[in-house]
Image: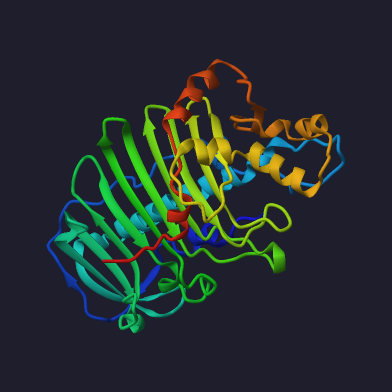
Amino acid sequence: MKTSTFLSAAIFVLAFSVLFTSCKTTEVKPQEDTLPQSFGVDIPSSISNNVGVSGGRISGRENDVINGNNIYKNLNTFISVGEGASKLVEAFIAGIRKYKIDRVLSVSYVSEDDTRSKNLVVSQNVTFETKTWDFQLTITDADSEKNSDGGKGLQIFWNKSSKATGIAIIKPYNFDRVKNANAKDAILRIDYAENGSANYDAEMLVTIVGLPLTGTGTDKFSINNLKMFAGKKGAVVDVYGNSNHPNAKLFSGSQGFNWAFVAAGNDTDNIGVAEVGLPASSLDNSDRKVLLKDNSIKAVFTREINSAFPGINANDLAAYLASTNAPGYFSKSGFVAAAASPGAGWDALTPRLETLSPFNPKVIGNLTLSFK
């Protein structure tokens, strides 16, 4: 399976680049920078990058062994996409800070990306989802403001504080109608807080809906909906979430599935450990055992292969699926081992997985996002 190229491209496509016109602007008196210095959790590359992977396959000779990097490459992809969404928000904030746009009440400009008129408005002391925010910045596609989405391309809510907290919602299509023409319905949201709880120094919740399909025919595949939490305490990062794939098939005739995952990484040592389940997209269940044990990669692959090849030798199948034994262990170079810890650094991370649980697959399949 391939990940959608949309988000990785968006990070560069949507960097804040504007050409101001003679349209009316309303300014406020100069003030200190109110924008958050960061808006996301950095995740160790051991669990967030596609390292050492190549096209995998399920079929093969009986003595084949599935490569561990192929087993977990989608885990790396989904976590990377979630982290990339926060980097996209930070790129926007960097542009806003560069042009000091947070010190402007309203401005109209023409985008250099799609040459369409955009409107930017900064409001103060606004309420969103029962919480009062010091600032709200909204950018809209001027000619689309009568549409059901209000033409909104970006909304950021934040509080002026030494400990950043905020919400960012992005609809890339309303920023660049040319380069994001295939992602008309995609919306991203980042909820970010520093010292938001006693468990973490910083945490973020990434929600993405409507990412476009890639591939053709039966190989069509989309991330579609993704929800991922990441929390950092010192050098340790916990991650859990789900990615919904209603159009993807693991095996011939199988139903759409949900990639449910939990992971923990150490940023200093750049190592990680993860556990993955493959429950059906339609499953309405939040129980960790059901999601990660009953529907573990090994359990699902074993079930599906036995169904497709009745009478297959059990020992050969177990050997073939050796890398699917949970949990999986990773270094900066990729997959290291399955089930048995490679060393003390990983030993310290492994127990954290039992405290983490993915979301309900059916809830992920029905995710929606909207602006204020």
The answer to whether residue 47 is above or below residue 176 is above
The answer to whether residue 135 is above or below residue 278 is below
The answer to whether residue 23 is above or below residue 321 is below
Q: Residue at x 53, y 29 (%)?
A: 270
Q: Quadrant of residue 3?
A: bottom right
User: Which quadrant: the N terminus?
Assistant: bottom right
How many marks are shown on the rendered structure?
A: 0
Q: Is residue 111 left or right of residue 249?
A: left
Horizontal and vertical percent position of residue 119: 29, 75
Q: Residue furthest top?
A: 344
| Figure coloring | rainbow
Q: Is residue 350 left or right of residue 218?
A: left
Q: Quadrant of residue 194?
A: top left
User: Which quadrant: the C terminus?
Assistant: bottom left
Horizontal and vertical percent position of residue 279: 56, 47
Q: Nearer the viewer, residue 87 or 273?
A: 273
Residue 298 visible somewhere in the drawing: yes
Horizontal and vertical percent position of residue 46: 56, 34
Q: Nearer the viewer, residue 212 or 158?
A: 212
Q: Residue at x 43, y 61 (%)?
A: 366
Residue 70 visible somewhere in the drawing: no
Q: Residue at x 50, y 60 (%)?
A: 12
Q: Residue furthest front?
A: 311
The answer to whether residue 294 is above or below residue 145 is above
Q: Is residue 99 left or right of residue 351?
A: left
Horizontal and vertical percent position of residue 147: 34, 81
Q: Residue at x 67, y 55 (%)?
A: 254
